[in-house]
Image: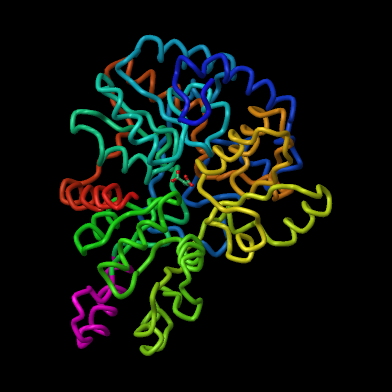
Amino acid sequence: MSTNTIFTDAASAQHNASVAQNIARLNLLAPGSTCSDDLKSNPWDTPGGYGPGASETDEVPAGYPVQGSIPQEYLKASDQELDARILAAKETLGERAVILGHFYQRDEVVKYADFVGDSFQLANAALTRQTAEAIVFCGVHFMAETADILSREDQAVILPNLAAGCSMADMADGPSVQQCWDELTELYKDEQDDGRLPVIPVTYMNCSAELKAFVGRNGGLVCTSSNAATVLEWAFERGRRVLFFPDQHLGRNTAKAMGVPLEQMPMWTPRKALGGNEAATLRDAKVILWHGFCSVHKRFNPGQIAKAREEYPGVRVIVHPECPMEVVDAADEAGSTDYIRRAIADATEPTVFAIGTEINMVNRLAAEYPQHTIFCLDPVICPCSTMYRIHPGYLAWVLEELVAGRVVNRITVPAEQQGDAKIALERMLAARP
Ligand code: CIZ
């Protein structure tokens, strides 16, 4: 099958089966090797929190979505029963529903996906299914919101488990960002006009629709981990500085690679006056970094890379730019999920790859490309715990509800955010080289 685009249904059915077999063989998620076996043993009780892998100090917002209970039959069903029910519902729904699976999603769910990819690829892939009345997003909340912004009004975007959020996205909330913006606007108000704005807001795709709308309204745009440098170039042409949120690491790694000195990248800590900075530091800043991070990627460290190099001389180390700067500096390459996938797909000689990103994706690549040796830099297997909340039981439930003519767990971006958020996404597309 072709590996330079996201997978499509017909092409992937057989392929998925053999990948699943390889993964079972690799048995990399054996009990005892994960950061928490709870993730596997109890997918149903996900009280307001982020769970294993997240920092204990991660603050969970007050309005964090909670998944209500679903019928007991889904909780009690065996894997085989769920499999049969999902396949039957999928068959009945046919072209009326499209299932999207994120790269970081577990295999037990990805195997039903019509498309597998990163969040933006998936939202766009769904647009190719004009007949789909329902877009079932097996990812996390912000991804479903993005799909809702880009899809038609009559298409329902469904998140199988409402508690599948993103701790990084939740680290930047509307009121805190507005407060930061007001303080910066006040600070820069007397600056001499040189035809550029004092500051342009840039948000990583991993944020709420509310914040995508915020940047759209304030002359800014969205970026992904694939196009962050292009987006920063766009912003620097129009502004003297950038306010980058929520991921400090993507902002720092990207701006550093573009030559911005670290001294000109102060960190904004919410709920502190001037984000914990001196006014002079913010005046001299080029990129103001929000204090956000990914709980999975922050687990990687340079020691893991040194160990990989010692054990496998000649190893090719590729990490995601959500990793801390020291990790990106120690790696051979840094790039988005799609960059990592393409790098492996394009390698013509058997190669040893040490990868710094989420384990489900790394295991899938290892199974898909057995000619290479592919392993995760983090020896303690720690999946994205919120993505993991999409258990096949939830998928079976939302699909069978659709078959019965009911839409459950619909994600709807409020009308007042839709327009501005779409502008921010459109600016990103226009900024593409
Ligand atoms: O945008 C995405 O899907 C994520 C979370 C990362 C990436 O690099 O694609």
Q: Position of residue 132 (x, y in %)?
A: 28, 21
Q: Within the magenta stretch, is there residue 177? A: yes
In the rendered view, tell whether residue 24 sits above or below residue 56.
above
Q: Position of residue 171 (x, y in %)?
A: 43, 61
Instruction: Tell me the quarter of the image containing the N terminus.
Output: top right
Residue drawn where x is 65% and y is 54% of the image: 332
In the rendered view, tell whether residue 355 sits above or below residue 279.
above
Which is nearer the eye, 34 or 230? 230
Residue drawn where x is 28% and y is 80% of the image: 183
Residue drawn where x is 42% and y is 68% of the image: 290
Q: Position of residue 245 (x, y in %)?
A: 39, 63
Q: Position of residue 195 (x, y in %)?
A: 18, 75
Which is nearer the eye, 404 or 419? 419
Q: Which residues are magenta?
A: 175-199
Residue 338 in the figure: left or right of residue 42 = left
In the rendered view, tell whether residue 353 sits above or below residue 207.
above
Q: Within the magenta stretch, is there residue 112? A: no
Residue 405 in the figure: left or right of residue 259 = left
Residue 318 in the figure: left or right of residue 119 = right
Q: Quadrant of residue 115?
A: top left
Q: Quadrant of residue 135?
A: top left
Residue drawn where x is 72% and y is 56% of the image: 305
